[in-house]
Amino acid sequence: MRARVLIVDDEAPARERLRSLLAELDQVDVIGEAVTGEEAVQRAAELAPDVVLLDVRMPGIDGIEAAKHMNVLEQPPAVIFTTAFDEYAMKAFDAQAVGYLLKPIRKEKLAAALTHAGRLSRPQLQKIADPAQARSHIAVRHREGLRLIPLGEVQFFFAEQKYTTVRHLKGEDLIEDSLRSLEDEFGTAFVRIHRNALVSVRYLEGIERNVDGQYFVRLRGCEAPLQVSRRMASELRERFRI
Amino acid sequence: MSEDESSLYLPDFCTSRAALANVLIVELTALVLTLAHENLGVGFWTDLSRTSLFLLWIGLAGAALLCWMRKPLSRLEVARGSAAVLILITALVAGISAAAYYLGRTTLVEDAGAAILFPPALGLFLVRNVAIGFVVTGIALRYFYVTHQWRRNIEMQATARVHALQARIRPHFLFNSMNTIASLTRSNPALAEEAVQDLADLFRANLSEKRDTITFEQEYEVARTYQRIEELRLGSRLRVDWKVDSLPRKALVPGLMLQPLLENAIYHGIEPQPDGGTVTVTGEMSGNLITVVVRNPVGNYESEREGNRLALANIRERLGLLYGERGLVKSGRFDNEYIVTLRFPHVEKLNES
């Protein structure tokens, strides 16, 4: 079976070189190229490639975040990272036995990497990511593919039974992340107000109490106030002086 | 600078600071000698003033002698110079001791009260002072020698560090350029050839030994070479706006300062932006001062790239070494821009063949 490959790199000469190297290999079809991390995730969702050759350093969404988003696809592709020089990432890749290629890439190494390419596991992806760097987007799966919501547009996350809903400026979507993992990842920009809700500090407008003594927060751009648990109310007022 | 290369490790005794330090040390020594006296307490203050008067003579005369002899002494090698200083100072001590004795004998001998200020007999007094003078001068010389070596060591380390930093091109840039060239070799061999030549020029400039100051023209050329290589890689994402027409081409500037600043601006300001951006380089001269400003946009995607802050520290160091207080480096973020400003005095390159 021929491997269907997606090339991702922000630099044109780098993409061109990969394309010409891959053209010389058997059993490989280049099915597309992407120039940014966002585009890479979109194209991976549309084209369902077998392998993605993914540059680590890219403007906007970098390679590692792009790989995380691709991993929630129905059929996640195998990922081979490419990098010219990135000490941090290289160390992490080695530690996690994640495949990567050093630029300028040799044809033989590229061929070997393609035959061994496998899916990355979620723990692997967690570990190669720079712990100081949270994702800049939230990936939402749709019938037509994947959509990326910039974190800055997210107003709150809400958990109901098994699902997590993300409410953002353009609507509401279901995501697969748990509130707990979201809180761990975006701890400084978001605040937990209740067992079932994590709200964006950026959209926090005020806190109010109804006649029953129950606290609510108002968020910019949201009509309905969100309930605050008793335990979190005092902490919240302390922290934001509201 | 020339002083560091000569063998003379003594501090300059001609300066007023040295004279003050000299007086302080003499007074402390006098105090120690007095305190060490057997029958402490009886005539403590008399003892102290007598000893300090005597030692001040030796201290100040010694400093004057070394100040006066500085030139000839600095021509000697370390061992000979040290021996010469040792002999000179010991002779001085002997001379002043003898003078003190004879002064007491001849002029003030009638006054019984003043007599205690002077030594009763020459022999022991002279031998004791010469011995003390010899030992103390020896210790002082050893001290000056060790501190001098130590300072020289630190200076050499600093220079070495500066050189190491200068020779450093970001590996990221090197490997990406290699990758670009590998790609061009297939698609556009002529352009690949040009890129290799540019890269060679850039490394030559980076590895060059002689680069305290070079003409602005040369400096500009190095930065443009760097820009050409980065343009191959980043394409239309990179735009550089040069506003340097008002700078005299022959003005002397610190070597290899524009290229690292441009590299920083591209690495932190352009590469992280999906649509790229414009780096603006302004060069101006007002009066006798040259001002160079490099600015790059800082966007939403300002990731915490741990970059070469060393480059800026290195430029600051070099400007300080070259121009002292008159060299200035400022950097900071203003609104959506990161701005680095260099200011230093203008020196025109002399016409030489």
Image: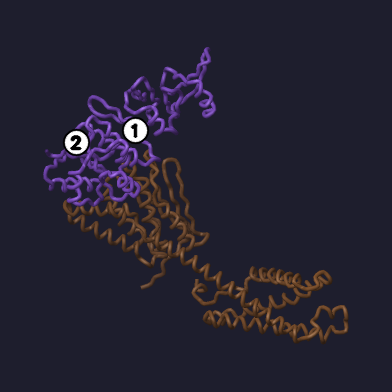
Chain colours: A purple, B brown
Q: How many other residues sit within 10 Å of disc 2, few (<14), some (14-19) or many (≥20)?
A: many
Residue B223's tag is none
Quadrant in which the C terminus of chain B is drawn: bottom left
Q: Which of marks 2 and 1 is nearer the N terminus?
A: 2
Report the residue at 32% width, 23% height from top: A173
Callouts 2 and 1 on one subunit:
yes
Q: Which residue is drawn at 62% across and 75% down?
A: B139
Q: In this view, does B296 lie above or below A192?
A: below
Q: Position of residue A200 (x, y in %)?
A: 42, 28
Residue at x 76%, y 82% (from the top left corner): B100
In terms of depth relative to the viewer, which is nearer, B31 or B110? B31
Q: Could you say which quadrant of the image residue B27 lies in?
A: bottom right
Q: Nearer the viewer, residue A229 or A43?
A: A229
- x and y percentages locating residue B293 in the rendered image: 42, 51
In this rendering, which labeled residue sits more in front, label 2 or label 1? 2
Q: Position of residue A209 (x, y in %)?
A: 52, 17
Q: Tell me if I can see residue A106 in this picture.
A: yes
Residue A49 numbered tag: 2
> Tag 1: residue type?
His
Q: Is residue A105 above or below residue B103?
A: above
User: Under tag 2, what secondary structure?
Assistant: loop
Residue occupying the point 74% across, 71% down: B36
Chain bearing tag 1 is A
Residue type, numbered disc 2? Pro
Asked which quadrant contains residue B252, the reply is bottom left
Asked whether residue B248 is in view, the answer is no
Which residue was labeled with disc 1? A137
Residue found at the very far top of the displayed protein: A211
SS type, badge 1: strand
